[in-house]
Amino acid sequence: MHSSPYRYGFYARPDFDFSRAQAEVHDLLRRQYGLISGGLFMPHATVKGFFVSDAQPAQMIERLDAALDGWEAFTAYNNGVILMGATGLVVSVRDLPDGSPNPAWHALQDRAWAALEPLIAPDCDFTPGDGHGRTGDNAFHAHFTLAMADPPRRMLSELKAFVAPGGRLVGPPTIRIEALHLYRFSADWQGNWPQTIRWELLNSWWRP
């Protein structure tokens, strides 16, 4: 594992209505089930997940400034709550109402990865598992996490029914994606990271 104490992430911030809905579910899952991992993070959809870099934040911001020149806000569509991976419970926002992938997400990720990938440390152990691209088993699937890492597998169906009874949406049917955030995280990465994680917002790209 890289010796840097920091991890970075580049995320899309949802609008107020969805942010509030996601935060409310995080709070309910903590109060009802003792689940904390999802709520340790700000409401967000991952564009570039955790990465290790020896670059200074100013260099990341400069490259993102250039890559995001001309980027415009867009509408994401709430596809409902789904299970993701072994222990993930998320709101999928990957698709348009007709079921086809929303091209705005891939266009955004293309810009972000073009800016950040050259700065990622070769031994970054997070990036190889990142959802990226349009096809394949590890294709990018835009989503907002409700629970991750700590839900018992045997309870995932119950958790899904609890937060989305009868297939009810969590949050509004449409979500305005108008702000992008670069974060820096620190934690005891080889120890009990959920108890030690801290984060700071380094920069925002807002397109009202």
Image (cartoon, rainbow, N blue to C red):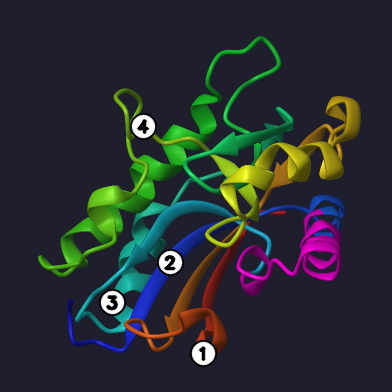
The residue identified by callout 1 is: 196
What kind of secondary structure does the magenta stretch mostly adopt? helix
Q: Height in image: 112 above or below 54? A: above
Mark 2 or mark 1: whose residue is earlier in sequence: 2
The residue identified by callout 3 is: 59
Indicate which label's residue lies in the foreground, 2 or 4: 4
The residue identified by callout 2 is: 9
Residue type at numbered disc 3: Gln
Report the number of numbered marks: 4
Q: In the displayed structure, does residue 100 sit left or right of residue 68?
A: right
The quarter of the picture where the N terminus appears is: bottom left
Magenta residues span 22-41
Label 2 sits on a secondary structure element that is strand
Inspect the magenta stretch and tell me whether residue 74 lies in it. no
Instruction: For the residues labelled 2 and 4, say whether their Cβ atoms are less than 8 Å apart.
Output: no
Q: In the displayed structure, does residue 51 sit left or right of residue 163?
A: left
Label 4 sits on a secondary structure element that is loop
Callout 3: few (<14), some (14-19), or many (20+) C-alpha neighbours within 10 Å?
few
The reply to whether residue 120 is in sight is: yes
